[in-house]
Amino acid sequence: MSRKREQATVQPKTRLRVGAAQNKGYSEGGASYTKKSMKGMIPNSGAPFEDIDNNNYTLRQRSRMLYMGSAIAASAIKTNRTNVVGNGLKLKSTINRHILGMSQEEAEEWQRRTEAEFELWATSKRACDATGVNDFYGIQQLALVSWLLSGDVFVVMKHYDPTPLMPYGLRLHLVEADRVRTPTTLSGGVYTRTTGRTASGNKIYDGVEIDASGTILAYHVANTHPFQSTAEPTEFVRIEAYGRESGLPNILHIMESERPEQFRGVPYLAQTIEPLLQMRRYTEAEIMSALVQSFFTAFITSEAAQNEIPMNEALGEDDIEVSDDANEYEMGAGTINVLKAGEDVRFGTPTHPNSGFDVFMRSLSEQVGAALEVPADLLLKSFTNSYSASRAALMEAWKAFKMRREWLTNDLCRPVYEIWLTEAVARGRIYAPAFFTDPLVRRAYLGSEWIGAPAGQLDPTKEITAAIMAIENGLSTREAETIKLNGGQFTANIDRLLSENERLRQANGEQAQGAQAFQNYIQSIVRNAVVREVELRGIGTDD
């Protein structure tokens, strides 16, 4: 074979035709429309207001339904509420004393005074809640639950005249997500649109008004919920986002953003609505199946007419007939039903309780928990694994809890604290020179931390030992470890311990004196007895 012929035999048999379609990059993978597995996946995503705002009404209703009717969904929401807020996020004033030119003692005294004044307002339902239902810590809980269920929640700032017992006029009014919407009309009982324009040309996305540059200007709040059955006509109030003179917020918007230029939040359960609904249905079906198969119910069939057969009373304790429909038969413990002529009832082979129920539900709970950032152990409150596995699950969940706590702090607690402190300084309740004239000084006064419930301890001995080692090696501070372990304050603990130790020292001193007096008394009795014995016997003795 010649060299030329040999080269021809090793060339590829097929060549790519010029101009033929070529799949490149992701078109061979996730973007392929030719693979059988991908042909049916034809998504049609749009702008945030199309994907989110237009679907939020349905998502809210379904999320609330699952919260009220699904144990897993309720657990996800309440687990977040308990861990993110707990008994409430408490103010810890942390002013920048170096900017303010204060000594350590002066700064601590200012902080104690401010925290006490804030507690005066925050712990009174009538003082901080416009509806008079919750104190500030209850408002935190309600805001978080509403945020998770509806995707967002709004807090309107209201001001009342102060009273002798309450020197502050600030009140908070929580507004549910449904009431903030685009002013529109109803057409055939259908919520027609979520977008609109104002007379000045500003766009409105589901109640949020923005200007040409995309900056939020105002919120449109209705006095009724959509489709609310009431004789009261629906009216809208436009609330500007910030005060024109003060620059402080008139309304707070608490939400989590997942896309740029997104102006309304998505319910926390949105991605898991379908599996949660199916889990609820499956659970109810298993309960009903097991319940039906546990009944001992007799059915009598006869060629005679139904009314000719003597009726025996049910053998069970409950003899109340739920339905008197001739075509309905009831099942219960010891129930006897007489069938019509020619009728028969047959049951399949008993298969319940289903031995695979727990495994299947656990598997689904792990998937749902992964999407909600709540591990299945915490979602089900079932810690059956090892200490290491349970601690890892708790630590993973706390990453999300701390993140939401920080969001809630930034969206609710710190803005409310700024508005309250502004009023407190203006009324002379708090002394803060240059608060209104120097922005840097104002920011120095506004420094704050919001301390909530700690993560908890699975093994206190191990975790406290680890905290001590971290402090001894300079990896952490006593203040930080105190907050992590029990949410306390190290300096406050030291002050309390000083007082307690002094009392304990005094108590121990008094106890020692009492014990010594008792010993002296006993010794005197013994000595007197010896002296009498010596005198009676006439025996001399040296003192």
Image (cartoon, rainbow, N blue to C red):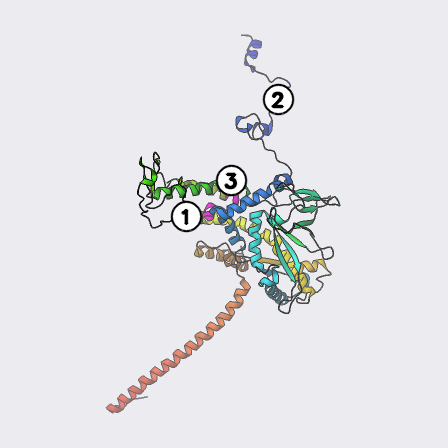
Q: Secondary structure at mark 2?
A: loop
Mark 1, residues whose alpha carbon is within 10 Å: few (<14), some, or many (≥20)? few
Which of pointers 3 and 1 lies earlier in the amino acid sequence?
A: 3
For the residues labelled 3 and 1, the Cα–Cα distance comes to 31 Å
Marks 3,2: beta carbons within 8 A: no
The residues colored magenta run: 369-383
x, y percentage for residue 287? Answer: 40, 44
Residue at image position (53%, 49%) is: 399
Which of pointers 3 and 2 lies earlier in the amino acid sequence?
A: 2
Amino acid type at image mark 2: Ala
Amino acid type at image mark 3: Glu
Residue that carries the numbered disc 1 in the rendered image: 386
Q: Secondary structure at mark 1?
A: loop
Nearer to us of marks 3 and 2 is 3
- Foreground residue among 397 and 212: 212
Residue that carries the numbered disc 3 in the rendered image: 274
- Foreground residue among 379 and 163: 163
Q: Is residue 478 above or below residue 180?
A: below
Residue at image position (54%, 44%) is: 62
> Would residue 100 be visible to someone looking at this image?
yes
Residue that carries the numbered disc 2 in the rendered image: 21
